Amino acid sequence: MKKTRKRITEDRFYNALTALMERKSYEDITISAISDEAGISRMTFYRNFKSKDDILVSHLNSVIEDIKKNFMAGSDLSEKNFWYEMIRASRSDPLNEHLMAAGLFEKTITSQLDFILSVYRDYFGLDLTDQDSVVFVYRKLGAVFGCLFYAALHKGFSMEILTKHLDTVIGEKNN
């Protein structure tokens, strides 16, 4: 997949920010430091973002778009495959760890929730006007995010344990 110039620039800022987060706290990182680390001017930063929070949120949106493309390109559009695609993406990119370090994990759940609800509506035929169906998705989402949150906090968390718990959650049916 060919990246646009804008996406390449955003990725450079993201990589710069995450590199800085390895060395200092999120609160201590300035826009100037991010621009210097990326080797890109502050003017370019402000053309793409309003704040350093926007770097992480923009990256999250890119990850969600990639998940959507990968899921839709697959032959198995099952609920289990959808959640495993979400897990694969979260394990391959330490974004959740960065969002937690920046205090943005809870804030960004909203954009993920919109995406997840649209998948349940468009691909699994769930009626989102029915409150029981929406609560069903929220319950699954809460269990999956709980597992992801724990995995982000505990870097050595095994995929085998994660898979076992997710299989239980994903296997639940909407009654």
Image (tube, rainbow, N blue to C red):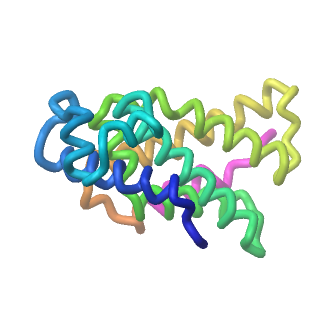
Residue 124 falls left or right of residue 24: right
Residue 84 placement (x, y as % from top left): 58, 62
- Which residue is at 53% across, 54% downward? 63
Q: Quadrant of residue 82?
A: bottom right
> Is residue 120 rendered magenta in the image?
no
Image quarter of the C terminus: top right
Residue 129 falls left or right of residue 147: right
Q: Nearer the viewer, residue 131 or 108?
A: 108
Q: Is residue 88 visible?
A: yes
Q: Quadrant of residue 80?
A: bottom right
Q: Nearer the viewer, residue 162 or 121?
A: 121
> Is residue 170 rendered magenta in the image?
yes
Residue 30 placement (x, y as % from top left): 21, 32
- Which residue is at 31% across, 55% downward? 15
Q: Nearer the viewer, residue 165 or 126?
A: 126
- Which residue is at 39% across, 49% downward? 95
Q: Residue furthest left?
A: 23
- The number of discs equals 0
Q: Main secondary structure of the magenta part?
A: helix
Q: Is residue 164 visible?
A: no
Residue 137 placement (x, y as % from top left): 69, 38
Q: Which residues are magenta?
A: 162-175
Image quarter of the N terminus: bottom right
The answer to whether 67 is drawn above or below residue 116 in the figure is below
